[in-house]
Amino acid sequence: MRTLRITDLEEELGRIYGKTEGHRVYQTIVPGILADFLKMVGQASAGKRVKEEYHLEDGRGTIILETVKTSGMPDIRAELRR
């Protein structure tokens, strides 16, 4: 799978679920996933790589988020594996 920006995740979910359902899934689950991931990043040491996998409940895929903790806003990379 290709590495995405977090903003591209909605389009990838649309490929799995269809545009309308992908948008709903994105709006429903991604905010919680991001909140959890950013909490983990906040607890990490500076310069540490943080990576976490989130499995979709219906088993259609796994969202993988990754970043390196910096002093500014993290550059989060996302991957969606089927």
Image (cartoon, helix red, strand yellow):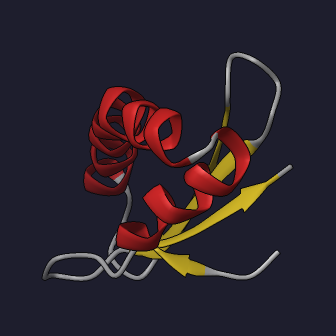
Q: How many marks?
A: 0
Pick the residue in front: 48 or 28.
Answer: 28
Q: Residue at x 29, y 50 (%)?
A: 38
Examine the rendered structure and indicate whether residue 67 appears above or below residue 19.
below
Q: Quadrant of the N terminus?
A: bottom right
Q: Residue 44 location in percent, x, y?
A: 38, 57
Examine the rendered structure and indicate whether residue 8 appears above or below residue 21.
below
Residue at the far top: name it: 57
Pick the residue in front: 16 or 40.
Answer: 16
Q: Residue 26 location in percent, x, y?
A: 40, 41
In-image side of 58 versus 6 (left or right): right
Pick the residue in front: 72 or 3.
Answer: 3
Residue 78, quarter of the rendered image? bottom right
Q: Residue at x 35, y 70 (%)?
A: 7
In-image side of 68 versus 78 (left or right): left
Examine the rendered structure and indicate whether residue 43 appears above or below residue 21.
below
Q: Residue 82 location in percent, x, y?
A: 86, 49
Pick the residue in front: 23 or 45.
Answer: 23
Residue 6, quarter of the rendered image? bottom left
Residue 64, quarter of the rendered image? bottom right
In-image side of 48 versus 41 (left or right): right
Q: Residue at x 57, y 52 (%)?
A: 14
Q: Residue at x 41, y 82 (%)?
A: 47
Examine the rendered structure and indicate whether residue 16 appears above or below residue 46.
above
